[in-house]
Image (spheres, rainbow, N blue to C red):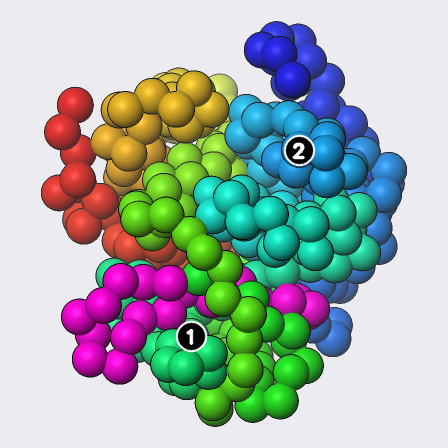
């Protein structure tokens, strides 16, 4: 697909927003996060079947749309506005991205068409007990053993793409795929700070898996992709938190005036607006670099992770303050954005580790 225009990206994002509104917005999110699997299944079916978001990155040769990460970022920004619990980041971006980066024809032919249609969803098993620097799973003689932590949407995935080390820890990290219901695979839902982002622990007990030949640097590629696309989702969440704060301060009055008329609150919201717009620019630069294969993409993605993580927390923290007492109640949505901001900052490696990778 050729270069995409800003108008086309905006139209794609608006189409996703329209589907989210019809599926209940954050009310639909709350219903889904309390249900089985913590997935908004009707929304996912509409997005995958109606708009084709599951196949955005999949080449046309495998029944996908052959788009770029810029289109995926537009979708994730819109989904971040309603904290939608659907497997776009986990399946349509990370798992699909791992297969594409591997470039193995057999695995691509077997999995990509079904991933593109939404018939199948996949999760990437990556992190070990000490985070994303070292996988918690090892591969030996075609068998996977160990535990993957923090698996996004792992409860509802039909397939796992697994990054595995070697028993002695000295060998390269390899890629494998395995059915979620295969012998030796146990999936355990995990309690989470952010109830809109379901995480699971996946344990492998000598589970037979299919190896996927992959090039060196796969982990670094996936980390760059993850940080860049996560920053787009964070931007959408921060923008919605600001919008909710403006709506609240306009509606509430004190001393016969709307809260939004007070200068101190105006200044606070103006600062929030600056942070949101600079988040948007930082994220867009990282996504564009990944789409173009720019050599600075890893550094720009790390910068986006640092900047967007820190300022998503700042914006949502300020939003809690400006909402007053209602902002700390479980019933008000602003608290969900605050929790998402805290949890997102730790995904795929915390900001202080990402900062060490920035060499612009």
Q: Position of residue 306 (x, y in %)?
A: 27, 39
The residue that appears at 51% across and 44% down in the rendered structure is: 103
Res 32 quadrant in image: bottom right
Q: Which residue is mark 2?
A: 59
Q: Quadrant of the N terminus?
A: top right
User: Mark 1, mark 2: which one is toward the viewer?
Assistant: 2
Residue where numbered disc 1 is placed: 148
Please name the residue shown 26% across and 62% down the image: 172
Which residue appears at 49% of the width and 66% of the height? 211
Q: Which badge, 1 or 2, comes first in the chain's sequence?
A: 2
Mark 2, other Cα within 10 Å: few <14 / some 14–19 / many ≥20: some
Residue 195 vs 261, above or below: the answer is: below
Residue 189, x across and y down, in percent: 56, 79
114 or 33: nearer the eye? 114
Q: Which residues are magenta?
A: 156-174
Residue 296 position within the rendered picture, expressed as x and y whole percent measured from the top left: 26, 24
Characterize the magenta stretch by its predominant secondary structure. loop
Query: Can residue 258 be seen here?
Result: no
Q: Count of labels shown?
A: 2
Locate residue 79 relative to residue 266 in the image: left or right.
right
Front residue of this view, candidates 309 and 204: 204
* Residue found at x 26% / y 81%: 167
């Amino acid at each position: 697909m050729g270069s995409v225009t800003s108008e086309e990206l905006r139209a794609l994002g608006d189409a996703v927003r329209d589907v989210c509104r019809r599926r209940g917005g954050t009310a639909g999110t709350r219903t889904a996060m309390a249900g089985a699997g913590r997935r908004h299944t009707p929304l996912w079916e509409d997005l995958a079947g109606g708009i084709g978001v599951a196949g955005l990155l999949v080449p046309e040769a495998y029944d996908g749309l052959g788009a770029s990460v810029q289109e995926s970022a537009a979708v994730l920004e819109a989904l971040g506005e309603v904290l939608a619990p659907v497997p776009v980041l986990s399946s349509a971006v990370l798992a699909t991205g791992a297969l594409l980066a591997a470039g193995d024809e057999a695995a691509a032919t077997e999995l990509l068409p079904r991933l593109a249609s939404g018939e199948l969803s996949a999760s990437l098993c990556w992190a070990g007990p000490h985070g994303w620097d070292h996988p918690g799973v090892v591969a030996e003689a075609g068998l996977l053993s160990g535990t993957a932590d923090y698996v996004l949407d792992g409860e509802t995935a039909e397939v796992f793409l697994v990054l595995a080390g070697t028993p002695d820890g000295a060998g390269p990290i390899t890629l494998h795929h395995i059915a979620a219901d295969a012998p030796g695979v146990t999936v355990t839902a995990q309690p989470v700070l952010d109830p809109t982002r379901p995480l699971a622990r996946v344990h492998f007990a000598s589970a037979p898996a299919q190896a996927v030949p992959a090039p060196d640097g796969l982990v670094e590629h996936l980390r760059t992709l993850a940080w860049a696309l996560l920053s787009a989702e964070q931007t959408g969440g921060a923008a919605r938190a600001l919008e909710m704060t403006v709506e609240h301060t306009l509606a509430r009055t004190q001393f016969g005036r709307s809260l939004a008329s007070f200068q101190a609150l105006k200044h606070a919201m103006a600062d929030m607006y600056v942070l949101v717009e600079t988040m948007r620019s930082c994220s867009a630069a990282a996504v564009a670099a990944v789409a173009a294969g720019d050599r600075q993409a890893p550094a720009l993605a790390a910068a986006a992770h640092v900047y967007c993580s820190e300022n998503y927390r700042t914006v949502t923290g300020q939003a809690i303050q400006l909402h007053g007492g209602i902002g700390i109640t479980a019933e008000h949505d602003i608290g969900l954005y605050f929790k998402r901001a805290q949890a997102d900052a730790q995904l795929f490696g915390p900001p202080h580790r990402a900062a060490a990778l920035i060499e612009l």
